[in-house]
Image: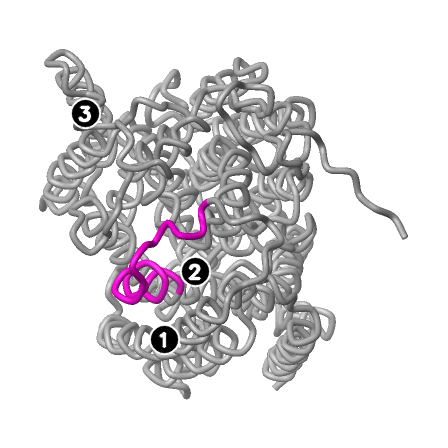
Amino acid sequence: KGQWVVIGLYLIMLLCILLGSKLLRMRSTKSEESLVVDHFFAGRSLGPVVLGFSVFASMFSGYTVVALPAEAYDKGFSAWRWVGSSTVVAVVYVAYGPRLHWLARERNYDSVFSFIWDRYGVRDPRKNVLHWLLMLTIVFPCFIYLVAQFDAFSNTLSSLSGGAIRKWVGCLILGAILVVFEIFGGLRAVALTDVIQGGVLIFGAMLILVFINVKPYSGLANVSEQLERADPTHVQVMSSDAALSWAEFWIGIGFQRALFPDYMVRAMSAKSQKSLRLASVILVISPFVVQAPLALYGLTGRAYHPNLENSKTVFSQVVLDVYEGSTGGAIFGSVMMAATIAGIMSTGDSVLIAVSHIVSLDLVRPFLVADVHANRSRPLHAEKTEEEINLDKKLMMISRGTTFVTAIVAIAIAIPVVESNQNLSFLIKFQSTFLANCAPLFVLGLYWRQLGRISVFVGLLLGLCVGIPLVGEPRPDAPPGQKGAILISLACNFAAVFITHAILRAIGKGEELDYGPQSDTHANLLKLISWRPPSPADEGIQLKLTPCEREPIFKNWWVMLLVVVLAWLALPFYRKAGNIDSLILGSPAWAFTSIMILVVVHAILIAGLLINWRGENVELTEEGKVKEEVKL
């Protein structure tokens, strides 16, 4: 009963935040502020703490909270590979975040596809093949990820209630909660609740560091010794195939999570570059306070509950052990279980609002307006016209309907999946293949002016055509996709982009067909695309906001390269497979070394962010000078 009380209080607290956010939104909306920007971008007002915890909480989904301990239960210390995937997430996010944040304000982007249309000269999205291919590439993985949250939530409730709550009922409960938060709160409510959810998630994950040292577990060293006796594969040095699996997992999860639409929206929703920078620091720290401890749940569960029918219940089983151990354990065990709910809800509401955002603004809006680029040169504080206000209201009505439909479809897909205990890791590989292949469009597109629409289309299409069959290839001796499907598909994508670009340039059609301006609006945008951000002093460039003085992608760029290179040393490819190491602080030496290497890598990355990321996007006058604020 205590667990249900804590979870109930937790949900009531989130409801209070939702109501407070709704009141704040009603009082703070400015006349020049778009309703859709206020709803989906939180009025571009997310500060460092709220933004940081929102990005952090969204990354550690319910799938992470359930699947990471389950993987540790099944495979042992190799589950710490999840920490390395967060390294890639942070690197990719930092690679595009500062520039996309500036461009979003400079060019009045109010959606992810606004950048794509503007960058690649898409005049009419309804008739553009790149638009439709990218729409499929982004929306399909969103549904997979949403189904994963329903799976995690229903399994958690079923385990907590001893099977009394049917899994399909859990799907309906989560669907109702997510719909209410998305419709009435928008991104502002989602981000504010993420602060609470992130805090609970950290606290719940870190509690294992306390309880693993008391009975019945008696320390990580004792757990490792039991695993060595019962199943040595859980502690021995991994094979080369497993190391390849780590590399593929890092790149697949790293690229796809950083390029998920909710992450890009948060980069555009930051209040300032400082907010985005400090939020990125929180993101870099987060895997060591969530993912690393979560693996310990699975390891302790394997040592003391080796015969679980479903490894996805191991987190709940360890929590029940703690809960039944003492009064203090009952209190903290309830918080630990609430951490599971927090992880699921933080990602579920983020994905649901992202789908609603894309469908209403990027799928439906092109059919309602004559020109999707009408607001690109709009002044920062210009009053909205009556026509624009009416369009915003119509789009908001559509987004509410989209939210209901999306939730219903996701529930309809999730119920048969959860009732049959399907393993979603296979679908997650598909999700990674889709989103990882968006990298050239978003990352290279911000810095390489000559990158064109035909080149990225060919690359995306080839990457998907190669990656999807490889991921789906049945292999009796290994998990699907372990041959390196994601790595191969990404390599084909980038190769196709460069080769197509070179061919078009060689035949003299590069500018005409591939990247040349389609309109004056597109020509103005291309002037802003470069490795180093443009300056207000550059001839022919009219800016509304100054770019960053420094960005980590170009200022002391070798720091980012060092981070990428050193991270791969965490893979124990230099060790003999099958060896059983001595223990260091309770973990095998190879696993401890991997974690310590990643600690150093993340410390270097944090230092690079704080030193090499400087400057704010300050408003400029029409003459290109910094606009002075008038103080009354």
Question: Which residue is most to the right?
Answer: 632
Q: Identify the element where label 2 is drawn.
A: helix
Q: Are marks 3 and 2 in contact (CB under 8 Å)?
A: no
Q: Sequence-wise, which precedes: disc 3 or disc 2?
A: 2
Residue at image mark 3? 512
The residue range painted magenta reads 357-376
Residue at image mark 1? 398
Q: CA distance from mark 1 to mark 2?
A: 34 Å
Residue at 20 percent of width and 40 percent of height: 481
Residue at image mark 2? 66
Q: Are marks 1 and 2 in contact (CB under 8 Å)?
A: no
- Report which quarter residue 382 is drawn in: bottom right
Quadrant for the N terminus in the image: bottom right
In the picture provided, is 6 more to the left or to the right than 379?
A: right
Residue 393 versus residue 622 in the image, above or below: below
Q: Say which of 239 and 486 sits in front.
A: 486
Q: CA distance from mark 3 to mark 2?
A: 51 Å
Q: Say which of 63 and 277 sits in front.
A: 277
The percent coordinates of residue 458 (x first, y second) are 15, 33
Q: Which three-letter amino acid code belongs to the residue tagged 2?
A: Val
Dot 2, how many residues are within 10 Å of its Cα: few (below 14), some (14-19), or many (20+)? Answer: many
In the picture provided, is 237 more to the left or to the right than 292?
A: left
Dot 3, how many residues are within 10 Å of its Cα: few (below 14), some (14-19), or many (20+)? Answer: few
